[in-house]
Image (spheres, rainbow, N blue to C red):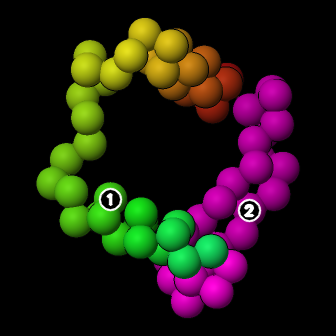
Amino acid sequence: MVKVIHVAEDGTEVAAIEVDDFTIEVIYSGIAEMLRDAAATPAAVAAGELPYAERQRREKILTRLRT
């Protein structure tokens, strides 16, 4: 199960949907495979290992969510 959330520029939640694996496979089978692979991966990449642009983007999103 995946929850997709649309967040406005000010950080407020505009809309959200929950999608199961079957629906994802029907819509686009590659997404379901990527999600299964990601779930099987032991740990996410540490923030320090992300490229600079990705760290900036992540921090911008987190800042919006906190305010």
SS at badge 1:
helix
- Give the camera-side residue of 54 and 12: 54
Q: Which residue is mark 2?
A: 16
Q: Residues within 10 Å of mark 2 (few under 14, many from 20)?
A: few
The answer to the question of whether label 1 and label 2 lie on touching residues, with beta carbons closer than 8 A, is: no
Q: Which residue is mark 1?
A: 38
x%, y% of residue 28?
Answer: 62, 74
Magenta segment includes 11: yes
Q: Amino acid at mark 2?
A: Ala
Which residue does the image show at 55% across and 89% down from the upper left? 22
- Location of residue 44 by image quarter: top left
Name the side, left or right, on which 30 lies relative to 41.
right
Residue 46 image-quadrant placement: top left
Residue 15 at what x, y percent from top left?
81, 57
Q: Specify few, some or many for label 1: CA neighbours under 10 Å numbering under 14, 14-19, or 20 or more.
A: few
Mark 2: which secondary structure?
strand
Q: Determine whether 48 is above or below 37 in the image.
A: above
Q: Which residues are magenta?
A: 1-27
